[in-house]
Image (tube, rainbow, N blue to C red):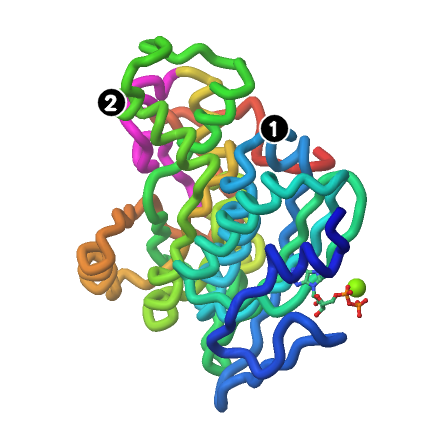
């Protein structure tokens, strides 16, 4: 039976790129670059809450880190370091090898050093602390949206929630026939969006010079845009028809379930940000340059609060956003 230290050595120790002292001592040492602030955030992934117990371990590893990178992107930060605290019910080396592969695939893609952590026995639980850098005073906060700013979102919303509903058996998607190529139906893309989200790291960095506020959409557009508006003392009205989403959702906009996937589903990991109208051209150019769709969905107004509209009528949703205690 391998010891805790064997496991750390085997699955959680890799060469680093920007770290003075990494895994192996009582603590790690990092040097923050001149003129930069350290940006720190933690996101926990719990089996049964954030992923299915029998989820593909590669995906669990990828997503545990990716959702944290998304928080760095939302701050306009360059991600550099992560720590990983993991509780495992038992030692399953096949599981660990795949988890580690997924985790480090994400770490390599975004140039992140894993510099420490903790490994213990317990119900499967993964807590990642992520650290990055942003020039002093340049972080993208929630509280600085301005009156009359445009509100933008990257990518499409609702796919992950659609994929989750499908995996939970809550909905039966048409054409869902075993052996069928789901890419054409959007189903495969939805499951991919759920299991392998790609954080908008490059977009977050570029938005430092463009956005007045930013948030990543993890709990659904209404909840997360709601945070920006509340922190900035502003309001907005958004039309469901204007929210970017895949065709399978677009063609079911009058379905109450589908409305909640788009507006309140969560797990999107897209960026929602505000910017002055004078930045429209810059944002459209950025969209082309990064090959990411970026859609203008509304503008901020004085009336505090967030209203969702559909067919020119106020929309009341089945749920407002994802809340663990809600
Ligand atoms: P201590 O007992 O001093 O807290 P540990 O025995 O918990 O140290 O950990 C030994 C080293 O391995 C430390 O550098 C720690 O940061 C690192 N480490 C432990 N678990 C992990 C993990 N899951 N991923 C990365 N590094 C880890
Ligand atoms: Mg320890």
246 within the magenta span: yes
Residue 225 seen from this side: no
155 relative to 81, above or below = above
Q: Relative to 279, is 266 on the left or the right?
A: right
Distance from disc 1 to disc 2, alpha carbons, whole Å, reads: 26 Å
Q: Of label 1 and label 2, which has the lower sequence position?
A: 1
User: Do we see residue 96 in this rendering?
Assistant: yes
Relative height, residue 248 to residue 85 (above, below)? above
Task: Select label 1 or label 2 by which is in front.
Answer: 1
The quarter of the displayed image where residue 290 is located: bottom left
Residue 154's x, y, as percent?
34, 48
Residue placed at 76% from the left, 46% from the top? Answer: 1
Percent position of residue 4, x then y:
75, 56
> Label 2 crowding class (10 Å Cα cut-off): few <14, some 14-19, many 20+?
few
Q: Nearer the viewer, residue 263 or 7?
A: 7
Disc 1: residue Cβ within 8 A of ligand 1's nearest atom: no
Q: Tell me residue 15's x, y (percent).
A: 51, 71
What number is the disc on residue 196?
Answer: none
Q: Residue furthest front?
A: 1
Query: Ligand 1: does it lie within 8 Å of the C-beta at label 2?
Result: no
Badge 1 is on which residue? 54
Crowding around mark 1 (Cα neighbors within 10 Å: few <14, some 14 to 19, many 20+) is few
Where does ligand 1 appear, by image quarter? bottom right
Left or right: residue 272 versus residue 294 is right
Instruction: Give residue 184's mark.
Output: 2
Q: Could you tell me which residue is drawn at 60 percent across and 39 percent down?
A: 95
SS of the residue under disc 1: loop
Relative image position of residue 195 (x, y in whole percent) = 47, 36
What span is colored magenta in the figure?
236-254
Q: Residue at x 37, y 51 (%)?
A: 151
- Pointers 1 and 2 in contact (CB under 8 A)? no
Quadrant housing the C terminus: top right
């Amino acid at each position: 039976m391998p010891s805790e230290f064997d496991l750390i050595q085997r699955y959680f120790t890799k060469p680093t790129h920007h770290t003075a002292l990494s895994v192996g001592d009582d603590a790690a040492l990092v040097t923050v670059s001149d003129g930069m602030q350290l940006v720190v955030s933690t996101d926990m992934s719990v089996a049964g809450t954030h992923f299915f117990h029998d989820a593909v371990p590669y995906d669990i590893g990828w997503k545990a880190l990716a959702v944290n990178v998304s928080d760095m992107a939302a701050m306009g930060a360059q991600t550099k370091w992560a720590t990983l605290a993991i509780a495992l019910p038992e030692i399953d080396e096949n599981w660990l090898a795949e988890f580690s592969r997924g985790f480090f695939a994400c770490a390599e893609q975004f140039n992140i050093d894993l510099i420490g952590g903790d490994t213990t026995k317990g119900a499967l639980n993964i807590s990642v602390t992520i650290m990055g850098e942003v020039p002093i005073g340049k972080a993208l906060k929630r509280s600085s949206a301005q009156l009359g700013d445009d509100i933008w979102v990257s990518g499409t919303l609702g796919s992950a929630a659609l994929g989750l509903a499908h995996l939970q058996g809550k909905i039966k998607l048409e054409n869902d026939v075993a052996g069928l190529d789901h890419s054409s139906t959007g189903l495969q893309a939805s499951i991919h969006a759920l299991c392998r989200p790609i954080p908008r790291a490059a977009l977050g960095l570029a938005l430092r010079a463009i956005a007045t506020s930013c948030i990543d959409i993890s709990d659904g557009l209404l909840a997360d845009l709601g945070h920006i508006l509340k922190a900035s003392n502003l309001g907005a009205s958004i039309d469901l028809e204007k929210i970017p989403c895949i065709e399978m959702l677009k063609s079911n906009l009058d379905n109450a379930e589908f409305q909640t996937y788009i507006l309140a589903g969560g797990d999107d990991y897209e960026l929602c940000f505000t910017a002055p109208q004078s930045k429209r051209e810059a944002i459209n150019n950025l969209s082309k340059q990064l090959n990411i769709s970026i859609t203008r969905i509304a503008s901020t107004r004085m009336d505090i609060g967030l209203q969702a509209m559909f067919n020119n009528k106020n929309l009341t949703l089945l749920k407002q956003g994802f809340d663990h205690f809600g």
